[in-house]
Each structure stands twice: as C-alpha cells, then as structure tokens.
Amino acid sequence: MNVVIHHNPNCGTSRNVLAIIEAAGYRPMVIEYLETGWTKPQLLGLFAAAGLTLRVTKSPAEQLGLLDPLVSDEALLDAMIEHPVLVNRPIVCTPKGVKLCRPSEAVLDLLDRLPPGPLAKEDGQLLIDAEGRRVG
C-alpha cells in the first residue's frame, strides 16, 4: 500500500502519525510541506477529499485577518500558498482515503494493518495494547 504524509517535523501530532505509519511497516512518502509549499490544485484536491480546514492555533491566521467570515475562499487559498503553516495537518493519503489525522490515532483507519502493540503516543496515551488491539 502506498502511503503519503504531508508532514511537519516540528509538530508532535505529525511525528506521532509518522511513527504509527512506520511502526505498521509502511515506508511512506514524506512531504515536508513547509519546505515544498502547496499549489492551488493540490489544496483544492485535499480539501475536497478530506474536508481540510484552516489551522487557527499556532499559525498567523488571526494576524493575517483570515478569521473574518467575509474572507473569500480564494483569499484563504492564496494565504495558504504563501503561508503553508496555515493548512491543518498532518494529512495522510492511502488507497483507503485522505484524512486530516488529528488526533493521531485517526491514521489507523487509513492503514491495512495495525502496528504491533503496545503502542503509545508521545504523551503516553496507549493506542494499541500488547495483544495488538486498538484501545479507546
């Protein structure tokens, strides 16, 4: 199975998602979108597939005036291209779908196989028990 993750290595959730994918035995294509940036067609496709949203926390959305409901979709897209951090992440694409994987355990729905357990997130929350079953 091909797995693509739009990844920010500075984001704990993104690191958790990448670790889950790798622990399940996948070698994902990792796109560090803060370095590569976005294109308008790429964003439109991801928004349509996953219902992505503007990242409000830990981003310049408020300072750029993007929280005003009168801001057009076109203006939001242009801002996301200029400021890639505005796109909420991590975004994972597999043959099973495209999803904003926040919280990180959301990625499990996109994988054909689970990582062996026990597996916990960075904060210690158990995701998969020692018998390989999802927790929660």
Image (tube, rainbow, N blue to C red):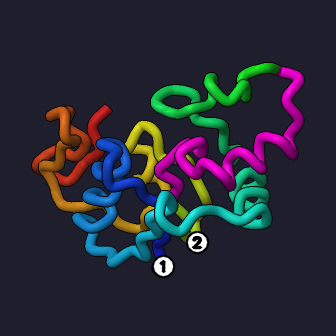
Front-most of 77 and 29? 77
Query: For the point 60% across and 48% down, which residue is it?
Result: 83
Marks 1/2: CA distance? 7 Å
Q: For numbered disc 2, what is the local secondary structure?
A: loop
Badge 2 crowding class, 10 Å Cα cut-off, few under 14, some 14 to 19, many 20 or more, is few
Q: Quadrant of residue 75?
A: top right
> Mark 2: which amino acid?
Pro
| Residue at the disc numbered 2 | 95
Stretch in magenta = 69-91
**Amino acid type, callout 1:** Asn
**28 falls in the magenta region:** no
Q: Is residue 5 visible?
A: no
Residue occupying image coordinates x 50% and y 47%: 89
Residue 48 visible here: yes
- 67 relative to 92 in the view: left or right: right
Say whether disc 1 or disc 2 marks the residue closer to the N-terminus: 1
**Where does the image place residue 27, in percent across and percent down from the top left?**
33, 78
Q: Which residue is nearer to you in this view: 68 or 44? A: 68
Question: Residue at 66% of width from left, 44% of height from top?
Answer: 52
Which residue is labeled 1 in the image?
Answer: 2
> What count of labels does the image hold?
2
Q: Quadrant of residue 60?
A: top right
Residue 130 x %, y %: 10, 49
Q: Is residue 7 above or below residue 77?
A: below
Vertical order, 17 against 103 (above or below): below
Q: For this view, does 130 lie left or right of residue 49?
A: left
103 or 131: nearer the viewer: 103
Residue 59 is situated, as x and y percent measured from the top left of the image, at 52, 33
Q: What element does badge 1 sit on?
A: loop
Task: Name the quarter where the C terminus is drawn.
Answer: top left
User: Residue at horizontal 53%, vertical 46%?
Assistant: 85
Q: Are marks 1 and 2 in contact (CB under 8 Å)?
A: yes
